[in-house]
Image (cartoon, rainbow, N blue to C red):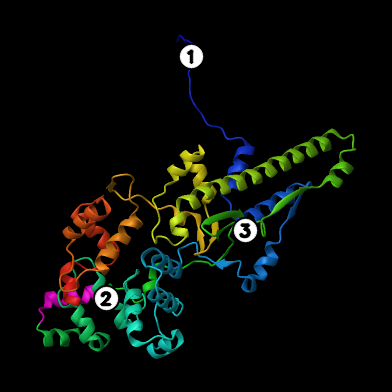
Amino acid sequence: MEQNIALYQKQAQQLNLSQGLRQSLTILQLDVIDLTKYLEERSMENPLLEIKSNLDSLMSGSAESGAFQIADKHESLFHYVLEQIQLTMRPTELRKIVLGLVGYLDPSGYLLTSDQELKAALKIDDTHFRDALELLQQLDPPGIGARSLQECLVLQAERDAGKIPEMAVIFLEEHFEAILANKWQNIATVLQISSSNLAKIKRYIQNLSPTPSINFVPDKTPYIYPELSVEKNGTHLSLSLLNNGQPSIDFAQDIYQRLVQTNDRRTRAFLSEKKQEYTSIQQAIVNRKRTLFRISEIIVAHQYAYLTKKQTYLESLLLRDIAQRLQLNESTVSRAIKDKYIQTPLGIFSLKHFLSKRSNLHQAEHGASSDQVLKLLKDLISHENPSHPLSDEKIADLLQNESNIQIARRTVAKYRQKAGIASARQRKTQK
């Protein structure tokens, strides 16, 4: 059998990350706590690496200093509710009362303190209490702010954007005790409901969530620490890195000078390698700070109106926008802001909080953000005539005429349902 051996030339592209680059990317995406742990692990293998950090003392004293917050890897129910209030409500006295009510929510999302105690604690009258409670109960998740299981289920049913079984709400409002006693057939007899409709109502009610927080159960509660701070000075915002708690490294010069005197080649090679590792890590830490600060500068400048409370919605801002401004890869920006927090006049937020997706709309000069569209939609509905609620088509017309946002009627319906707002017909019925 004849064998032919030939030599071919083939061109291919392959990305090989050096150890230094991999280390730099790792350091870039770690938060303060994980970065400290990472450096401590490196110091165990490198005698020339000395770690400096006061993170442990800060964490132990966090309750007094207020520097730390508790965060979930899953989004916190309280953070989710507060974020909606910040994004959708004007800074009015009523908004302050809603925020006060949030402080009394239990971990399940219920408001179990009595109405009288709440009014006394917040120093408000019946009218302000009812208005604030209604605003709170209009937020997501459906059922938030409920004062009982019955109210929680009713709120969910009323907010259901889908087609719910006829009479389901009446079952919950007027025959809840019978439902708890499993006397479904008795209710059906009183209301003259057929067996098939009864089965639909029963299945629907049994699938409702008993607690608003069912999708907000954290698996652990680690500490978070803001790495940046933005403060308002007159009309300006000043951004700074928070060095308190940031780990740093020093070169163990004494140990190096003592060991480098040896004539053993393997020892000298080991010292050279570890010195180079120190230099590489030090540069990666510097790059991490510089990249994080540059990204934050763009975010703060772009969201100036939101941070100074001149508007309650975020401007549209994507990873791609930041990456193009800084001439970085999108994945680099994503790594840099991962689990990073900033302290602002509005509170402590993750940097990702300020990235608002653009909606699939067209605006004359720039794309409107989803937050902005939701805010405008809620504003229109909050000022509508209760006797003649705005239809989705009318809202679409108003958005185009008043805000120059072109949006289809069915898109308005999707935003309205996302915000948990009933249809015009249902809003008119509820009044």
Q: Which mark is residue 206?
A: 2
Left or right: 50 in relation to 305: right
Q: At x 25% / y 55%, what residue is drawn?
A: 402
- Mark 2 neighbour class, 10 Å CA radius: few under 14, some 14 to 19, many 20 or more: few
- The local secondary structure at tag 2 comes to helix
Q: At which x and y percent is residue 106?
A: 44, 79
To which quarter of the image does residue 314 belong?
bottom left
Q: CA distance from mark 2 to mark 1?
A: 69 Å
Q: At which x and y percent is residue 233?
A: 56, 59
**Residue placed under numbered mark 3 in the picture:** 33
Left or right: 91 in relation to 189: right
Quadrant into which the C terminus falls? bottom left
Name the amino acid, label 2.
Gln
Q: Which mark is residue 8?
A: 1
Residue 72 visible in the picture: yes
Residue 340 visible in the picture: no
Quick one: label 2 or label 1, which is nearer the N terminus?
1
Region rendered in magenta: 193-205
To which quarter of the image does residue 217 belong?
bottom left
Quick one: label 2 or label 3, which is nearer the N terminus?
3
Q: CA distance from mark 3 to mark 1?
A: 52 Å
- Mark 1 neighbour class, 10 Å CA radius: few under 14, some 14 to 19, many 20 or more: few
To which quarter of the image does residue 253 belong?
top right
Q: CA distance from mark 2 to mark 3?
A: 43 Å
